Image (cartoon, grey):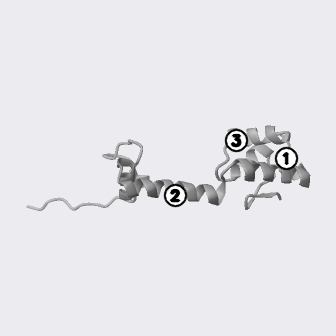
Amino acid sequence: MARIAGIDLPNKHVDIALTYIFGIGRSSAIEICRKTGIDAERRMNDLKAEEINELRNVIENDYAVEGRLRTEVSLNIKRLMDIGCYRGLRHRKGLPVRGQRTRTNARTRKGKRKTVAGKKK
């Protein structure tokens, strides 16, 4: 089992297996295969050690992945909250950030429903 950027990659096609790394999607994975000259249809277990090292080098040098990317994203969100912009306030309150409605739906961001008792006479 190949290990790149601290992730054990499954025995799937190379372009699919690379997407298991945080920060690499399908288009990035295909581009990495093109840069290294590795056929995207080959399986991960079929790759030689030199080819895996080549993949590892391209990913480390050209892409921000895993821990480095997660840190960068969290710092960007923290910056938005610190300057007090609208998006930062939405992050701070735990509400949807990108303009979705909140009267109904938005349960993923808002959490479990909090029932409010009806008014008594």
Q: Tell me which label, 1 or 2, sits earlier in the chain.
A: 1
* 93 displayed left or right of 37: left
The quarter in which the C terminus is drawn is bottom left
**Amino acid under label 3?**
Ser
> Under tag 3, what secondary structure?
helix
User: How many residues crowd mark 3 within 10 Å: few (<14), some (14–19), many (20+)?
Assistant: some
Disc 2 marks which amino acid?
Ser
Q: Which residue is mark 2?
A: 74
Instruction: For marks 3 and 1, give the one nearer the viewer.
Output: 3
Residue type pointed to by label 1:
Arg
Query: Which quadrant of the rendered structure holds the N terminus?
Result: bottom right
Task: Give the farthest residue toward the left.
Answer: 121
Question: Which residue is labeled 1 in the image?
Answer: 43
Q: Residues within 10 Å of mark 2 (few under 14, many from 20)?
A: few
Who comes first in sequence, dot 2 or dot 3?
3
Residue 25 in which image quadrant: top right
